[in-house]
Amino acid sequence: MDWGLILFKTLVFPGLTFLLLVIFTTFYLERKLVADMHGRTGPYYVGPYGIFQTVADIFKILQKEVIIHREADKFLFLLVPAVAFLMVALVAAFIPYDENLWIVSTDFDLVISLALLTSLPAIFLFAGWVSRSKYPFIGGIRVINQLISGEIPLWLAGLSVALWYGTFNYVEIVQKFDIIGFFVNLVGFAIFLVAILIVADRPPFDIPEAEQEIVYGFLTEYTGVGYLLLAGAKFLEVFVLAAMTVTLFLGGFKGPFLPGWVWFFIKIFFVYYLAFAIRASTPRIRLDQLIRLTWKILVPLSLLNIAVILILKAI
Amino acid sequence: MGIEGLKKLMKTYFGVEAKEYPHNLVAETYLFEIEPVHIREVAKLLKQEGFNFFHTLAPVDYSPKGRGLELNYFFENLEEKVWVVIRTEIPLDNPQIDSIHDIYPAIEACEREEWEKFGINFVGHPRLKPMLLDDTLQGKWVQRKSYIPEAHRS
Amino acid sequence: MYRGAQIITEPVGREGDLMILNWGVQHPASGPMRIKVWLDGETIVKVENDPGYVTRNLEKLLEYRTWENAVVNIERICFIDDLGTLVNWALAVEKLAEVEVPKNVQYFRVILAEVGRIVSHLIGIGSMFGALGVATPMMWVLSLREYYLDFLEHYSGYRISTASIVPGGLKYAPTKEDFELLKKAIEETERRWPEYKELFRDNPTLVERYKGVGVIPKELVYEMGLRGPVARASGVDYDVRKRYPYSSYEDFDFNVVTKEDGDAYSRFLVVLEEVEESVKILKQALEGMPEGDKWKVRMPKKIKAGEVYSAVEWARGAVEYFVVSDGGTGPYRVKISAPSFMNIWVLEKIAPGHKLADLATIFASLYICHGDLDR
């Protein structure tokens, strides 16, 4: 085993440094694309096309004083952002950017990714709880409500893919991907897309951090590094979920002519663009409406989807 | 019902004649000058005669002119498009009048505001506590003519 | 010694099983106002308004102004639509001084007042979407608003707070380019409006969030003395422009937009459709603009003792002044009765029973401007 290569992969590409780059890029892309939909210009002055605006902003946030609320549990308050970031970054280790471009590949990629993602509601609840403040607390409770109802369709839709291809390994799933598999999993794809918006708190499901209702949810009391880590964790979560969508439903790195990783990023950009367009056009819904949507429509639909796939598989 | 009925009732109960009020730019208006003690009965009469829309409570401090505090209540009859001004005067050294918030709920906030600015004690008002003004201005009755902003600047 | 705005002294936190939430002063959706919310889980049990964070006490300040330079304070009742309040002040003082302004001045005042209404309503539409966390409509309506602000800027030199309407006429004579700019703004509105209307009105999530929320029955409108779009959304066709025409409004053909349901969605629709009516009035005023180049009538420096009550339909409802003169160079007393101050108190009656998330939508649909709430 080549330890040098593994170290390079973990720390540089596609590891930690690359993930930080992903945060910068997606943040910039989101601002620029949403601004375009608004009829604005977006970042413009710092660097060519304003690409360094996000860098400047992130360094501005880093310089901010870390304020800890008097009543807050100091140790947990500082620990939670780091844990959240770590949990999401771990999921990124399983993503295959190309046939041989991944950090870890096991027989249980999908299950491990989903399990790691399931830890997030608890972490975010803790973030709200240890802040000892009212708005973060309400935000934390909302996270639990929302993410649990969002994760069940996510799990079911993800597992239906594994059922069809007969494996949990991402690379194998991508290699087995074909046009029949795409159409069979189309319903699962739709459910998965909605579920990742719910799980990643993306608009119109940004209920736990609804600005106009509860300020910034569990992020309200965080400043400086803590805020950056938590917000970064959320950006990474979107990236990880988009990467999972691409891998499971859109054939990951598969594609003609171009190298695999280029295809991977083209497809991930498609998912991102969809998320941004939804953000720019759809008002936020209410928590009870969301729970009705997940438990009355998404969960039954994904169970039905699994049943159909089982039948198709048997034929 | 309506303004005719109100004129008649005001005459019989309180001996108050309706006066033309030409100063209202928007609509036909009648003025009734009443005693402050009668405000609750008058308000009930108004409600009964269909003057169901409350507009404004406008106190004017006439103390530099040698008079007291004049209170103007503006009501409108939405069906007849007729307005009524109820005018009464209370002394400035003991500004006290009954609250009519239970008859016209819309007046509650207005009475609270005038209490804060003029120091008029609306008897029976449930919420006479600071609303608009800064803590430093409470109890100074800023809207009275005796209050000079320059003298209180810190 | 200045001790800051009202210091919150009473204990906050919990009351039995209820959580007390300070929804405001420093909150993205509240504006400079505190709303104390008693919460049972996510359900609102009780609501208490605490305004007063932007009080300037304009009524007192006005007593130190002359009749003409009082416009500076009058237009600061609310910066979003300052023109309607100026029209009212001009009407009141002209009535006191017994001065008549020529027809062309009245028409141009109508134009300015309607531009103010459109500018205000566009922001209102944007912020009703903003309460749901989507900024696109706000950006779109703001870009449309720029055309009207260009007109105001070219006419008066200021984009907002124009101080252009004074007792006795207008501060500046409008030029040909002003009318060209206004025509351009109207054309742009008519070009964009069908698309905007379709996108805004039929947005399914907006309908889901606004429909049936914060219902104000007709009786409550009378009881609480509600005004403007809030009253009209509950089926009360109270519009001063139509009911008691002033400043030549009787010459124009327009509808009073009313809705029957009285929920937040109706209030949104009323604001949305009133923009169309305002554009209609603007076009008629531009077409029927009377000849005349006298834009200001001589006003006396001192106005004889007397009193006047005047009301105009402003963007947020009827704004009413009670002005007393004692024969001096300025008002003896001005009472400003503002629509937001009357409308805000209904929140305490309709909010309980809703979810916390609905507080933002109900508050936005009440179309409050904090400037005229506190004055």
Image (cartoon, coloured by chain):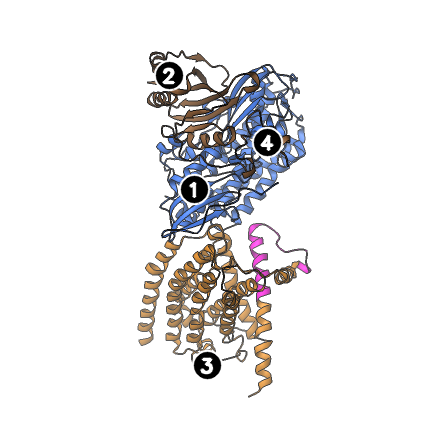
Chain colours: A orange, B brown, C blue
Chain that bears disc 2: B
Q: Which residue occupies the extreme front position in the image?
A: B93
Q: Mark 3 points at which residue?
A: A106
Residue C204 at least partly seen: no
Which residue type does callout 1 highlight? Glu
Confirm whether circles 2 and 4 share one chain: no
Kindly check if marks 3 and 4 are in contact, taking CB atoms under 8 A apart as contact: no
Which image quadrant: the C terminus of chain B?
A: top right
Residue B64 at least partly seen: yes
> Where in the figure is residue A123, as x and y percent of width and height?
46, 67
In space, the residues marked 1 and 4 are separated at their CA atoms by 29 Å
In space, the residues marked 2 and 4 are separated at their CA atoms by 36 Å
Which residue type does callout 3 highlight? Thr
Q: Name the residue under label 1.
A: C48
Confirm whether circles 1 and 4 share one chain: yes
> Where in the figure is residue C332, as x and y percent of width and height?
58, 21
Confirm whether circles 3 and 4 share one chain: no
Confirm whether circles 1 and 3 share one chain: no
The mark closer to the camera, 1 or 3, is: 1
Q: Mark 2 points at which residue?
A: B3
Q: Mark 4 points at which residue?
A: C75
The magenta segment is A23-49
Q: Magenta region, mostly helix, strand or loop?
A: helix
At x 39%, y 27%, the residue is: B100
The quarter of the picture where residue C85 lies is: top right
| Mark 1 closeness class: few <14, some 14–19, many ≥20 residues within 10 Å | some
Which residue type does callout 2 highlight? Ile
Confirm whether circles 1 and 2 share one chain: no
**Residue C64 in the image: above or below residue A263:** above
